[in-house]
Image: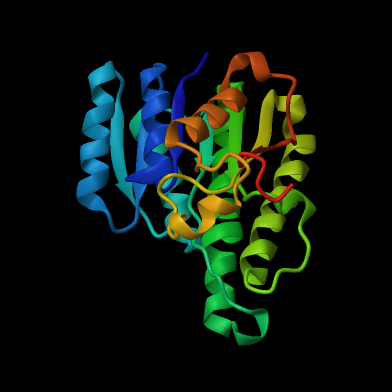
């Protein structure tokens, strides 16, 4: 099994938890960051304690050229790629009628477009590895998304990620590459927890470990026959 992974947005939070979990399982890991250079460096150093190779790479992946270079550098530093986790994506809570053109593009660029740029560049490396995993991030209920008074631009971007991932799953299955989606609800590092927790059936947010475990499920070789699926890690929220 070829263990080389790139996790976007992995200097802190969910992305960091995922990257460290992969390192603990013997994966060489590329930690991606945009502005959090020191945090990414520390995370990479933490991963190295498992005896794997780890690097911290900077890129603004909302820019196609930068995203392409990130993937190329990750593959060069690690000696190839077999796993890509697209964790980056900004959030906006605003009525669609009040959403500016700049905010609209930011939602699409940081969520859908960044996922597309990174993945499209990574696919040839995954094919070369002969085994691959793509895990993208949406959000709870995105697969059955309906109109929302305050999150329309964000929902549109995340729903697009799901459609894109399912398309990849069909196209890449013959290459032994799976593509799946993890859809988090409220996590322990989410903002506004005091207001949201009472709305959760579990009465608590997801831990970062629970989210990284969901990603790990899709990456595990025992999940070879699972592709094009959406796994919600939301404690029953928005059912």
Q: Nearer the viewer, residue 232 or 60?
A: 232
- Report the side of 211 relative to 120 (left or right): left
Q: How many marks?
A: 0
User: Compared to 208, does 8 lie above or below?
Assistant: below
Q: Picture coordinates of residue 138 (x, y %)?
A: 62, 50
In the displayed structure, would residue 34 be above or below residue 124? below
Q: Is residue 215 left or right of residue 181?
A: left
Which colour style is shown?
Answer: rainbow
| Closest to the observer, 82 or 93 | 93
- Of residues 27 and 122, which is closer to you in this image? 27
Q: Quadrant of residue 220?
A: top right
Query: Can the viewer see residue 128?
Result: yes
Instruction: Answer yes or no: is residue 76 visible.
Output: no
Q: Is residue 164 above or below residue 80?
A: below
Measuring 76% from the left and 42% from the top, which residue is drawn there?
Answer: 166
Q: Where does residue 149 sit, x and y in percent of width and height?
A: 68, 74
Residue 30 coordinates in the image, percent (x, y):
37, 36
Among the 4 quarters of the image, the one containing residue 133? top right
Q: Nearer the viewer, residue 164 or 127?
A: 164
The residue at 61%/58% (across/down) is 112
Say above or below: 160 vs 2: below
**Residue at position x 52%, y 63% in the image:** 91
> Residue visible at 31% across and 20% down?
52
């Amino acid at each position: 099994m070829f263990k080389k992974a790139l996790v976007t947005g992995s200097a802190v939070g969910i992305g960091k938890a995922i990257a460290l979990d992969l390192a603990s399982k013997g994966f060489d890991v590329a930690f991606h960051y945009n502005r959090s250079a020191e945090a990414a460096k520390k995370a990479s150093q933490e991963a190295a304690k498992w005896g794997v190779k780890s690097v911290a790479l900077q890129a603004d992946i909302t820019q196609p050229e930068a995203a392409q270079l990130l993937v190329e550098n990750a593959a060069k530093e690690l000696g190839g790629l077999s796993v890509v986790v697209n964790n980056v994506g900004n959030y906006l809570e605003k009525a669609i009628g009040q959403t500016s053109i700049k905010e609209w593009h930011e939602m699409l660029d940081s969520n859908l477009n960044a996922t597309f740029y990174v993945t499209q560049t990574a696919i040839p490396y995954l094919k070369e590895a002969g085994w691959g995993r793509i895990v993208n991030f949406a959000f709870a209920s995105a697969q059955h998304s309906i109109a929302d008074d305050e999150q329309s631009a964000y929902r549109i971007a995340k729903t697009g990620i799901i459609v894109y991932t399912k398309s990849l799953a069909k196209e890449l299955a013959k290459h032994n590459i799976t593509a799946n989606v993890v859809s988090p609800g409220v996590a322990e590092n989410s903002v506004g927890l005091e207001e949201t927790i009472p709305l959760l059936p579990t009465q608590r947010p997801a831990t970062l470990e629970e989210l990284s475990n969901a990603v790990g499920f899709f990456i595990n070789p025992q999940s070879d026959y699972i592709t094009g699926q959406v796994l919600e890690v939301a404690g029953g929220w928005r059912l």
